[in-house]
Image (tube, rainbow, N blue to C red):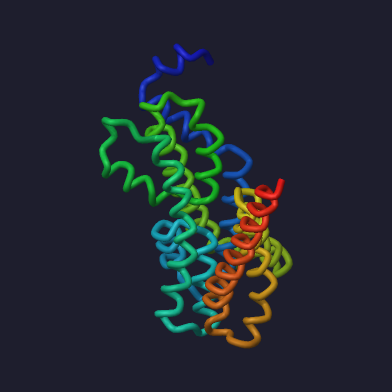
Amino acid sequence: MSAEQRVERGGFNWFLTGMRGVLSLPAIILMTSYVGFSAFALQAGLTRAEAVTMTLGIWALPSQMILVGSMLGGANIAASFLAVTLSAIRMMPMVASIMPEMRTPKTPVWKLLFLSHFIAITSWVFASMHLKEVPKEHRVAYFAGFAMTLTLANTAVVGISYGIVSQFPPVVAGALFMLTPVYFISSIWASARQPVVKFAFIIGVVSGPLLALVAPQFDVLIAGIGGGTIAYLIDRYRRRKQGLAGERA
């Protein structure tokens, strides 16, 4: 498509183009993972309405897993709230990096605030890859088409599959459930742009199971804060060492 053709297309057409993005491989993998989340929610004792509301309201599969895992682990509401909040903070850099790419002098702030709810790993990666191909004045419509459709589609997947997964053999249900952490691990690792993120991820993966044995009610919280802090210190030391090496050179 030529540059002139891209400019001539209206906002609604770009919205529909964004909607077609849900047929991409990352979006399909995410939908399959939400089938696994449905199995997890069912095993955790959540109702269909609770699982659907959690998907639509939180819209971050890792945060949803953390919340359900905290509930199963018997964590109190304050610890669960803090763990989910800390998990959601990782979205802030994603929002900060994407919004300037979509904003124009005529873009209302309320639209950007509304669309920020739909920014998660899959939508952020998709936007990072494709927004540059869209005229800036139509990027809000394009992103809204993809991100809102992705959210609603996965919410529908949870609602529909909730009753179906209970009929699956245990092996199938277990395999679907494993898609959730596999998707979480692969997407976080693939989207990490800075070494500090990978440092924190490795520390969290290693320390999480150990802390689950020592402090099961606060394992996620401790692993998150502790792992992030240690990763920050390691990365700071690495940067300082590189800086000194550059000065000597």
Residue 24 in picture, x, y percent from top left: 60, 38
Vertical placement of residue 17 versus 70, above or below: above
- Residue at horizontal 63%, vertical 62%? 237
Residue 18 picture location, percent across and down? 47, 33
Which is nearer the eye, 200 or 205? 200
Q: In this view, does 107 lie to the left or right of 132?
A: left
Q: Quadrant of residue 202?
A: bottom right
Q: Residue at x 62, y 60 (%)?
A: 235
Q: Is residue 12 left or right of residue 18?
A: left
Residue situated furthest bottom in the rendering: 214
Q: In this view, does 82 lie to the left or right of 200?
A: left
Residue extending farthest to the front is 248
Q: Which of 59 and 185 is in front in this view?
A: 185
Q: Is residue 55 above or below residue 144?
A: below
- Foreground: 11 or 95? 95
Rendered-image quadrant of the C terminus: top right
| Left or right of residue 185: residue 8 | left
**Residue 28 picture location, percent across and down:** 60, 45
